[in-house]
């Protein structure tokens, strides 16, 4: 599997199991060790690659342990400190990482609760771990833009120089993105004033700020939606906003002229695939890829429902999405192809039917 598929598979596991995880040890066993093995590719049972409970005496601190040390080419390259899933990742809880970072050859430190991963290095002062991470990975909200940087830390592609060289840019780009995200969700006075001055010539009174606050939030949401739609249309080779989520289009393997012809045919049929349907498809695909390669799980949209199939074969259905009404339904099919519909209020509800989805996928292994 590609890195994105492995992350999606682990994200699905975390989503399903985190409510039952109550301790740090359980978090390490259920989530962190699979991350080290599945995502980064290290052998967690080989002490020459992964050292659990790594010990290095630090000053008057004797016998302190770090949860995991990752070894590459005989040297400790990465230190990992774990917290219980759901616990906040505060730098105040990373004192052992700070101490060990200065006494080993490691240049990468990781603070994680099994769902969120914060990566640190020593940009500010040599051999002193920074207080702010240069990279953040959240399995509950996967950002494909960070996948290449995570891949550099894996066993197969480990490249310390490349990681450190890119760290400063990643640190500030990530911080700016988080600031922009916060402003888009809830603009503060400075952000409001900046935007108001660009579109309004009068004095900016409290009444004006109160008037423009909802307008800025509305405009921000519409802008983001427009950007997403443009990306989807570009990715699927569409014109005028209508497209079908064919497997070739989703993987980018079809020629441009074939994509355009398919989109035009879809428009003639009145089929419009929504972003929400694509997100639901990715959830089902992430669940199913624990059984078969994700590339075999494909989408086909129709007027009446959005179908998820194996091998693009109508005789191998996994699920159907009925999202064209106010109440959304997930359709699941039994061995006789008889469909049962389940009402869902949010896309996360699909995870409740993970066992049924996997069972459907296993029929076609």
Image (spheres, grey):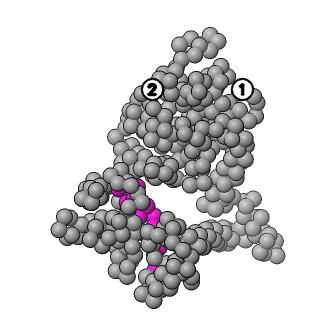
Question: In the image, which residues are magenta?
Answer: 272-288
Quick check: can you spot residue 321? no
Tell me which corner region of the image, top left, top right, bottom left or bottom right, holds residue 232.
bottom right
Quick check: can you spot residue 256? yes
Dot 2: element: loop
Dot 1: element: loop
From the viewer's perspective, is 59 left or right of 335?
right
Q: Residue furthest bottom?
A: 268
Q: Name the residue: 53% across, 13% down.
A: 63
Q: Residues within 10 Å of mark 2 (few under 14, many from 20)?
A: few
Q: Name the residue: 76% across, 30% down.
A: 125
Look at the image and tell me in which quarter the C terminus lies: bottom left
Mark with earlier residue (1, 2): 2
Does 261 appear above or below 230? below
Q: Which residue is mark 1?
A: 127
Q: Name the residue: 66% across, 54% down.
A: 177
Q: Residues within 10 Å of mark 1 (few under 14, many from 20)?
A: some
Q: Name the residue: 56% across, 54% down.
A: 143
Tell me which corner region of the image, top left, top right, bottom left or bottom right, holds residue 218.
bottom right
Give percent across and percent down for residue 354. 31, 54
Q: Which residue is mark 2?
A: 46
Give percent across and percent down for residue 317. 29, 68
Does 348 appear above or below 309? above
In magenta segment, residue 285 = yes
């Amino acid at each position: 599997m590609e890195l994105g598929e492995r992350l999606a598979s682990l994200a699905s596991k975390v989503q399903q199991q985190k409510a039952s995880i109550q301790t740090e040890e359980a978090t390490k066993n259920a989530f962190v060790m699979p991350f080290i093995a599945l995502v980064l590719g290290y052998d967690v049972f080989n002490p020459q690659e992964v050292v659990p409970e790594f010990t290095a005496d630090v000053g008057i601190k004797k016998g302190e342990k770090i949860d995991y040390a990752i070894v590459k080419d005989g040297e400790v390259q990465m230190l990992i400190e774990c917290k219980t899933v759901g616990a906040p990742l505060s730098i105040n809880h990373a004192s052992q990482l700070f101490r060990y970072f200065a006494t080993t050859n490691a240049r990468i430190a990781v603070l994680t609760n099994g769902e969120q991963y914060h990566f640190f290095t020593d940009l500010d002062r040599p051999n002193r771990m920074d207080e702010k991470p240069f990279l953040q990975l959240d399995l509950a909200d996967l950002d494909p833009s960070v996948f290449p940087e995570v891949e550099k830390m894996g066993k197969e592609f480990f490249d310390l120089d490349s990681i450190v060289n890119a760290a400063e840019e990643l640190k500030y780009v990530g911080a700016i993105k988080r600031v922009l995200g916060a402003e888009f969700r809830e603009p503060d006075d400075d952000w409001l004033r900046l935007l108001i001055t660009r579109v309004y010539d009068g004095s900016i009174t409290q009444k004006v700020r109160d008037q423009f606050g909802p307008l800025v939030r509305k405009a921000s949401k519409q802008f983001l939606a427009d950007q997403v739609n443009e990306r989807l249309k570009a990715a699927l080779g569409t014109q005028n906003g209508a497209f079908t989520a064919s497997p070739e289009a989703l993987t980018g393997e079809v020629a441009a002229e074939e994509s355009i012809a398919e989109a035009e045919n879809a428009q003639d049929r009145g089929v419009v695939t929504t972003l929400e349907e694509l997100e639901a498809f990715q959830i089902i695909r992430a669940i199913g890829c624990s059984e078969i390669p994700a590339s075999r799980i494909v989408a086909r949209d129709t007027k009446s429902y959005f179908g998820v199939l194996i091998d693009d074969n109508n005789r191998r259905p996994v699920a159907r999405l009925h999202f064209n009404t106010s109440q959304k339904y997930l359709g699941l099919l039994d061995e006789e192809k008889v469909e049962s519909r389940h009402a869902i209020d949010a896309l996360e509800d699909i995870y409740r039917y993970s066992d049924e989805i996997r069972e459907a996928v296993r029929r076609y292994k």
